[in-house]
Image (tube, rainbow, N blue to C red):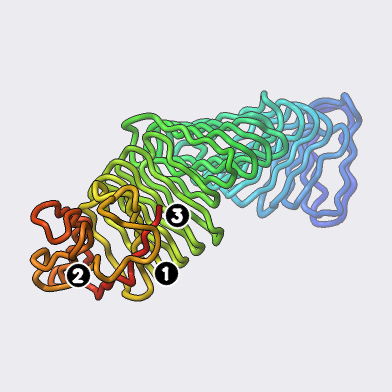
Amino acid sequence: MGAAGNDTLDGGGGIDTMAGGLGNDIYVVDAVQDVVSEAGGGGRDLVLASVNFSLGNGLDDLTLTGTAAAGTGNAGANLITGNAGTNTLIGGAANDTLSGLDGNDSLDGGTGIDRLSGGLGNDLYRVDNAGDVVLEAVDAGDDVVYASVTYTLVNGAERLILTGTAANGTGNNAANRITGNTAANRLTGGAGLDTLDGGAGADTLVGGLGSDLYVVDNAGDLVSEAGGSGADRVLSSVTFTLGVEVESLTLTGTAAIAGTGNASRNRIDGNAGANLLTGFGEADILVAGAGNDTLVGGAGADRLYGEAGLDVFRYGSAAEGGDLIYGFIAVNDGFQVSAAGFGGGLTVGALPAARFTASSAGLSTAPAGSGGFAYDTDNGRLFWDANGSTAGGATLLTTLVGAPTLTAADFNVIA
């Protein structure tokens, strides 16, 4: 038991009870059953603990020593310092300062305006007050902030996860991963290669500079990307159309959903469901997934990849030609062509056998009648001949890589 001075009390290896009295006292705690008793207003008192410890009333500061893992504050304004190990430091309702040092630390200041410093290691911060300050060295680990309030990542922190009702999250210039909650969040990246995942709400995702990745899971999600700022990609579990300046779209999950490109050169990949994949005016890459997919390249010389399912390659007119088709499997896969777009006397339904020829002679054996398709079995080139056997009018529609077998039964005419 101390008196009015600045005392140091060390009970040794036993189960001890220490009372410092007045003054700025130091307590050395080395057993979880040790009891520290301190009168309120009796100075600024420090506990040095080599075991997990929670500050009692009247105590101010806690420093972990040895192999102690956890330190918890009280209702006062505490200074809690970890050791070289992996620490869990928890403040209280007042304005606390938590310092983690070298390990992979978890710091939660509580409800006050807190100052959190993780030091080296992969640190975790919990922020619940707009005035909380996180201090993190650059390149000092992979650090994550869990924020229940709107928050902007400080330099040195890499990841941000919004919790509770937090609305907005903003990154820094590093490669950030920012994850929203169930609210309608606005997530904003910086200059790095960012991953933005809005969560369940109808979110606004703004990538900034860099090649960014967006995770979309709500039909109301909005992706905004600056021009000329990298090669950007969307992972979507719902039907989605790429906005301007985003280059790639990958459908995820197993739902039968659709993916549509924009006016740029896009790559669109399907998922395990039955997808409708649609390009636009440029040379796009469309890759079917495991389901029975429909691929619409649109204008431009596109590359279309069939996969395991029963895939359909749809053409609205001969002007959409010049494509390459990979992985076409006879009997399983097929073509849809528009009667209105192609003309040539086509009518809705199965393509009559007389409107299709297949020969190594190519166009020299054009179909009879006013319009039809001619397939070169040597090189896989498929032509649309609007004039049939009359000279002229032939347009290269696509080339089937590998020259698979093709018959009139592989075509269906739609409106």
Q: CA distance from mark 3 to mark 2?
A: 29 Å
Q: CA distance from mark 1 to mark 2?
A: 23 Å
Q: Is any atom of residue 344 visible in this view? A: yes
Which amino acid, mark 2?
Thr
Mark sitting earlier along the chain (3/2): 3
Q: CA distance from mark 1 to mark 3?
A: 12 Å
Q: Is 303 placed left or right of 256 in the picture?
A: left
- Please report contact status of discs 1 and 3: CB closer than 8 Å, yes or no: no
Which amino acid, mark 1?
Leu
Residue sitting at x 59%, y 38% = 220
| Residue 96 rendering spot, x and y as whole percentages | 72, 30
Q: Residues within 10 Å of mark 3 (few under 14, many from 20)?
A: many
| Residue 28 rendering spot, x and y as whole percentages | 77, 45
Give the structural element (helix, strand or loop) at label 1: loop
Give the structural element (helix, strand or loop) at label 3: strand
Q: Is 41 placed left or right of 234 in the picture?
A: right
Q: Nearer the viewer, mark 3 or mark 2?
A: 2
As drawn, 372 above or below 177: below
Residue sitting at x 88%, y 50% = 16
- Between 366 and 57, the one nearer to me in the picture: 366
| Residue 298 rendering spot, x and y as whole percentages | 32, 47
Q: Quadrant of the N terminus?
A: top right
Give the structural element (helix, strand or loop) at label 2: strand
Which amino acid, mark 3?
Leu
Q: Is any atom of residue 139 visible in this view? A: no
Q: Looking at the rendered structure, which numbered label has been put on residue 357? A: 2
**Residue for badge 3:** 276
Q: Residues within 10 Å of mark 2 (few under 14, many from 20)?
A: many
